[in-house]
Image (cartoon, rainbow, N blue to C red):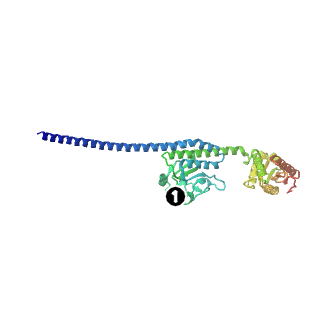
Amino acid sequence: MIDNRTFLLSIVISVALVFLLLVFFLRALQLSRSLKKQNSEIRTLLNKIHRIDDELTFVLDFIRELPHLTGELNNQMNPRGIPQVLMNVLVRTFQPEQAVVLLRRKRTLAQPERDKEFIAAAIAAPRSTFDRGMVVTMGEGDLGYVAQQHRVLDHSELDREAQPHRHVRAKGLSAFRPDLASPMTIDERTLGVIALRRPEKQKPYGKEVFRVIAQMGAFALNNLQAYAEVKSVADVDPLTKIWNKGVLNFRLGELVFDAEESKRSLAVFLFDIDHFKNYNDINGHVAGDRLLQTLARLVKEQVRIDDIFGRFGGEEFLLILPNRTKSQARITGEKIRATIEDYEFPFGDKQPLNRLTISGGVACFPQDGRNSSELIRAADQALYQAKRAGRNRIMAAGAVALAD
């Protein structure tokens, strides 16, 4: 009887132990699954934290960059320096494989459609086939499409929207496929375009940062253009639209210094209108103003691109001729004198010489003067001698008249 009881007890204990073991195993399994789930959630959470930290680092790095970018842009006194400043910040911020900064070209009388073109002013493209100076036209390829927009575009948006523009050309800048591009716009006018390809740092806030860079570039370009316009108004004679006396004196001083440093020649041609008071008295000041405007235009058409021409005062004009000898300056002066004499100015036949004419004096650095004041004085003395010799002639400092 005792043995049976013992046997039954051992069975009950064994069953209980098995049950306890099973419960423990199930509990352990449940706990393990819970821990795995928690670990997965922790890993996901850590990944999110790392991603957020990475994004914050990206934004904070750019925020630290902002004061330097602002300072560099504000220190630029020439629009040509802005593209490289923008390129530097693009490279530091995004580390792209390729990048380009385009500036809009200015229209000219000879090329009125040129402002539809954008020229590559700065590039970062060690493994590309495009170079600085390459041009893309508004609406041509991805970059030309971006120039027409007013927002930042990524590669997916460009693939979806810009496809019709890609068939225009497939080389140079037109073949450039940016991953991120933005126009630089002010008041709906596009001043330039920035674009990059394969950035090493692609962040969720990349478009926002890219937009800020583009907008800062637009503001800098616009401010410089506005400053240039204001400065031009201050430096240009309002009647004749050529340089005024202040600019002429300043540039002559600079060029004398350059000529002395480089051991090159520099000439000046100072001239005025013969009997201009007579012309004004007979025909009126309105006719006199029109005469000055026409004469300024005629002379501008005769001078080289590096010559500096302006109104020196009243009916007196000054032409500064860099890298020109005295004989070359005399030839230039004579061509201008002949052009004016041959032109049919209104009321020219009423002048004492029966034509509208000029008299002028030529002086050269360093023979006739070692500084700007001495040069002008020498040219003025030669002009005075031309007047005394009968007018309508050009005389060089220390020389005789060329024409009667």
Q: Quadrant of residue 14?
A: top left
Q: Position of residue 339 (x, y in %)?
A: 78, 56
Of residues 83 and 354, which is closer to you in this image? 83
Residue under the image location 66 percent in, 44 percent down: 227
Q: In the rendered view of the protein, which quadrant contains the C terminus? A: bottom right
The three-letter code of the residue at mark 1 reads Arg
Q: Is residue 337 above or below residue 26?
A: below
Looking at the image, can residue 346 be seen?
Answer: no
Q: Is residue 31 above or below residue 395?
A: above
Of residues 359 and 263, which is closer to you in this image? 263
Of residues 97 and 20, which is closer to you in this image? 20
Residue under the image location 15 percent in, 42 percent down: 7
Instruction: Tell me the crowding category of disc 1: few under 14, some 14 to 19, or many 20 or more residues within 10 angstroms, Cα based.
Output: many
Identify residue for label 1. 166
Q: In the rendered view of the protein, which quadrant contains the N terminus? A: top left
Is residue 177 rendered to the left or right of residue 274?
left
Is residue 358 rendered to the left or right of residue 191?
right
Looking at the image, can residue 182 be seen?
Answer: yes
Q: Position of residue 370 (x, y in %)?
A: 82, 49
Is residue 384 rendered to the left or right of residue 177?
right
Residue under the image location 78 percent in, 52 percent down: 259
